[in-house]
Image (cartoon, helix red, strand yellow):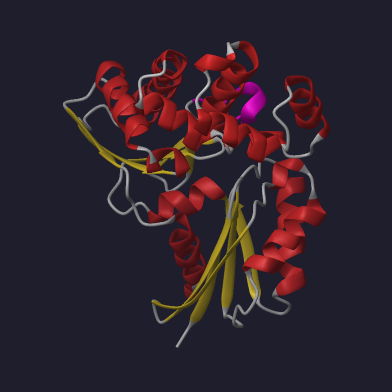
């Protein structure tokens, strides 16, 4: 019976799964492994922790967030080859595994530490929108919401800041002093992950009607919905009027963010019906399926 391993290397978490004849026989999880950040030692450690106890396999597929160049691809292959010597190993961008897992979806939308929208063209190739990283994009991502929360903490009066946000900031930066927070942020090698870790506090503030959070929700959910609308208009056939969108990533664990995004989609997307699936199969299963295809070839 064929045995495959799928690995989803996200900006916050690495997840891995081994399937034998389509049945899960092992799984693992560890910290972040965003290859675009360039910290290969950290990435190697996260992979090692996530893959502890992983069985040998006939084929392995690693899906990496931030893999935007051939250099990234080569680095990812080298890292996996160190662990799976002599086995069939290949790597893909994380959105490709998420799309593979999104059964029946017309479009796949990832909103985790970063964000990206993708779909499959009639020829089988993948069309992608967004995904330019936290400096140039990542609309509607955990980073963007976390950034709004951090700015609120740094700029607004003490009595406007919730205890949950104060605790989240201290957990992320090890201090509540504003000057030290800024120094720690710019001195760290994982800016996006640290800022994105404030997402749960932001969502909690939004649920309780904090003005800064409600304003940010409208802006960033709207930007992501607009990106989705442009992708649909440019990449899907015009006759497709009922569109199913598979929504992956940690942003969608918070109902207040789901509702805000759904409201913006109704405004921005020109379609008869848009179905938002906030609980699609995990991208790591898509990576395992892609590994299975390697065996079939």
Q: Is residue 288 rendered magenta in the image?
A: no
User: Closest to the observer: 169 or 111?
Assistant: 169
Asked if residue 184 shows in the view, the reply is: yes
User: Closest to the observer: 108 or 140?
Assistant: 140
Where, quadrant-wise, is the N terminus in this rendering? bottom left
Q: Residue 167 sits in which quadrant?
A: top right
Is 101 left or right of 105, judged from the image as shown?
right
Q: Residue at x 40, y 82 (%)?
A: 21
How far from the left and from the top, in percent, is residue 200? Answer: 48, 37
How far from the left and from the top, in percent, is residue 247? Answer: 37, 41
Residue at the far left in the pictured view: 272
Residue at the far front in the pictured view: 159
Residue at the far bottom in the pictured view: 1
Q: Is residue 133 rendered magenta in the image?
A: yes
How far from the left and from the top, in percent, is residue 199? Answer: 51, 34
Asked if residue 116 shows in the view, the reply is: no
Q: Residue at x 58, y 80 (%)?
A: 57
How far from the left and from the top, in percent, is residue 126? Answer: 47, 43
User: Closest to the observer: 159 or 140?
Assistant: 159
Q: Residue at x 81, y 56 (%)?
A: 41
Q: Which residues are magenta?
A: 132-139
Is 44 left or right of 53, judged from the image as shown?
right
């Amino acid at each position: 019976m064929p045995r495959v391993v799928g690995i989803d290397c996200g900006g916050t978490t690495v997840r891995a799964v081994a399937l034998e004849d389509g049945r899960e026989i092992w799984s693992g999880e560890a910290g972040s492994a965003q290859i675009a950040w360039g910290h290969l030692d950290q990435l190697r450690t996260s992979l090692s922790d996530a893959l502890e106890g992983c069985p040998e396999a006939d084929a392995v597929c690693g899906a990496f967030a931030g893999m935007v160049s051939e250099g990234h691809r080569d680095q990812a292959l080298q890292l996996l080859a160190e662990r799976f010597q002599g086995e069939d190993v290949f790597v893909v961008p994380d959105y490709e595994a998420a799309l593979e897992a999104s059964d029946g979806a017309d479009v796949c939308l990832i909103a985790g530490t970063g964000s990206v929208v993708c779909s499959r063209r009639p020829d089988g190739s993948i069309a992608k929108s967004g995904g330019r990283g936290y400096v140039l994009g990542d609309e509607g991502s955990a980073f963007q919401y976390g950034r709004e929360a951090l700015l609120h903490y740094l700029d607004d009066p003490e009595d406007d800041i919730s205890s949950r946000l104060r605790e989240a900031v201290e957990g992320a930066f090890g201090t509540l002093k504003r000057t030290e927070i800024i120094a720690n942020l710019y001195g760290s090698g994982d800016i996006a992950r640290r800022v994105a870790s404030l997402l749960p506090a932001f969502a909690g503030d939004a649920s309780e009607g904090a003005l800064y959070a409600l304003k940010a929700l409208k802006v960033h959910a709207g930007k992501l919905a607009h990106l989705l609308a442009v992708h649909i208009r440019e990449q899907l056939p015009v006759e497709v009027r009922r569109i199913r969108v598979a929504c992956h990533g940690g942003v969608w664990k918070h109902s207040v963010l789901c509702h805000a995004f759904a409201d913006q989609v109704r405004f921005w997307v020109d379609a008869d019906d848009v179905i938002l699936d906030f609980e699609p199969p995990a991208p790591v299963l898509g990576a395992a399926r892609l590994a299975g295809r390697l065996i079939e070839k």
